[in-house]
Image (spheres, rainbow, N blue to C red):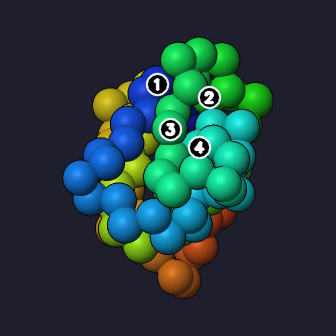
Amino acid sequence: MTRIARLSFNPDECLAHRACSVASRVFGKESEDRPDLPADVADYLDADRDLIIEAVMACPMSAIALQFADGKVVTSKDYDAGQGVAKWTQY
């Protein structure tokens, strides 16, 4: 599997659907209106990899993007219903 190198969040695109709350250690608590990436987010990229990818793919506004170590950048626009989240968790 390709490691996640970077995670980014665009607050201007977020409408606070909280679909990302599946990865609560990374995207904050449900009580918050919008996600707030922790300063130590890099510590979670490996440990919470599958949850992070699920959260990225669940964002209806594509406000969250992740970049894999090979340079590939994905958002929920890259979600393929036929392959599901597994396409990216196994990438």
Going 37% across and 67% down the picture, which residue do you hit? 15
Circle 3 packing at 10 Å, graded few (<14), some (14-19), many (20+), is: few
- Residues at badges 3 and 4 in contact (C-beta under 8 Å)? yes
Would residue 21 be visible to someone looking at this image? yes
Q: Name the residue under label 2.
A: 45
Give the mark toward the camera: 1 or 4.
4
Asked whether, in this view, residue 60 is left or right of residue 39, the answer is left
Distance, label 4 to label 2, CA atoms, is 12 Å
| Residue 73 screen position, x and y as percent | 33, 43
Sequence order check, earlier mark of 1 and 2: 1
Residue 91 left/right relative to 9? right
Identified by mark 3, the residue type is Asp
Disc 4 designates what residue? 27
Along the viewing direction, whichever of 89 and 30 lies nearer the viewer: 30
User: x%, y% of residue 19?
Assistant: 57, 66
The N terminus appears in which quarter of the rendering?
top right
Q: What element carries label 1?
A: strand
- Three-letter code, disc 1: Ala
Q: In the image shown, does 90 or 79 lie closer to the viewer? A: 79
Does label 4 or label 2 sit earlier along the sequence? 4
Q: How far apart are marks 1 and 4 (CA)?
A: 17 Å
The residue lying at 67 percent from left, 26 percent from top is 44
- Alpha carbon of mark 3 to alpha carbon of mark 4: how far? 6 Å
